[in-house]
Image (cartoon, rainbow, N blue to C red):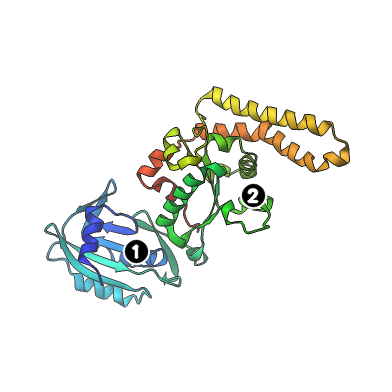
Amino acid sequence: MIEYSTIVDIIKNNRTQNVICRSLELRPSELCSFIVALANTEGGYIFIGAELINNRFSLCHLQDSFNTNSLIEVIKSKRIEADYETSLITVDGKRLLVFCIDKSQAPISLNGRYYMYSNNGFYEVSEKAIHYKPTVFISYASCDEPIADIIEKAIIDKLGDRVSISRYTRLKYKDSFKEFMNSIQDHDYVLCIVSASYLKSKACMYEVGETIKDHHYKDRLLFVVLSEAERKYYGDKSPETIAPGIYDPLKRAEYILYWKKSYEDLKKQVDELDVEAARPLIQVLKETGDIYRNDIGEFMEFLSDENGKSFSLLAENEFDDITQLIKVKS
């Protein structure tokens, strides 16, 4: 049953997620597509007699001449296999027609075509894509776990079980950590939580290196840059430095020099060993050299060139900037 209080709460607080608005009556065929799209996504609402302006609801008022019953009968004739309810509701003296659509447990089609909801509209997908879960690999330094927890919760709150998230804390006893890191290329998105500790972490820079092997990595690489303002989330386990300072060329040079020294120190030790004894360290030396010569510089250039936002700015809108980029593929 459509709850009046729920509709008022959605409108008054501009809760636009999974809500489709149209200011005037629309063709039944288009309305059926909206119903199918919402049912195939997470369910939601359709408001006829309202529109979205800058992500805020504006009520337009349906005229008394609007034939609600006729419209509903036409929709019923399409025999859409979706569960939905309708109701005429008046808010602040303005009347609108509300459709409440339940999430479907199986893909629903309209004339043999499948649709899903996105940003106050719908788009066509394959039947297989409806139950496809985008995968997100969260890459972060262990000391930044409190921040990773906050961001993961925000993603789950927005996308629920429509997304699959990988973190090293999910590893079971005796699972291979290296295999887990190598799986990064199998994920649709990589979300890097960038801090001073991150840029000096061998494991994190290895994950970055695996990501940028893909020539199209910029399309799937998401990031959050931390600042000293986030220290309040760490409790008594706060690292000495949190902010990476990546927008300062001198600071970026410091990180490259850090990895240059790491490589040279390790090479010096390896050179003092005979071939057999050094064998297990050769690959580590190569990986460190790749970080120093290629990965750290390219990664920081990408970060400084992209129009990224700080953790504080992203948190202001509950990480919508990130969740809106994580979408189901057709």
Label 2 packing within 10 angstroms: few (<14), some (14-19), many (20+): many
Sooner in the amino-acid sequence: mark 2 or mark 1: 1
Residue 160 is at least partly visible in this image: yes
Foreground disc of the pair 2, 1: 2
165 w.r.t. 192: above or below: below
Q: Could you tell whether 317 is left or right of 9 in the image?
A: right
Q: Quadrant of the N terminus?
A: bottom left
Q: What residue appears at the point 85 percent right and 40 percent down from the top-left corner? A: 277
Q: Amino acid at mark 1?
A: Phe
Q: Name the secondary structure under disc 2.
A: helix
* Residue 168 x %, y %: 59, 52
Q: CA distance from mark 2 to mark 1?
A: 40 Å
Q: What residue appears at the point 21 percent right and 54 percent down from the top-left corner? A: 12
* Residue 71 x %, y %: 24, 70
- Tag shown at residue 34: 1
Q: What residue appears at the point 18 percent right and 69 percent down from the top-left corner? A: 67
* Residue 151 x %, y %: 45, 48
Label 1 packing within 10 angstroms: few (<14), some (14-19), many (20+): many
Give the residue at the far front of this rendering. Answer: 236
Residue 309 is at least partly visible in this image: no
Q: Amino acid at mark 2?
A: Met
Quadrant housing residue 232: top left
Give the residue at the far top of this rendering. Answer: 250
* Residue at image mark 2: 181
Q: Name the secondary structure under disc 1.
A: helix
* Residue 135 x %, y %: 54, 55
261 w.r.t. 45: above or below: above
Q: Nearer the viewer, residue 53 or 102?
A: 102
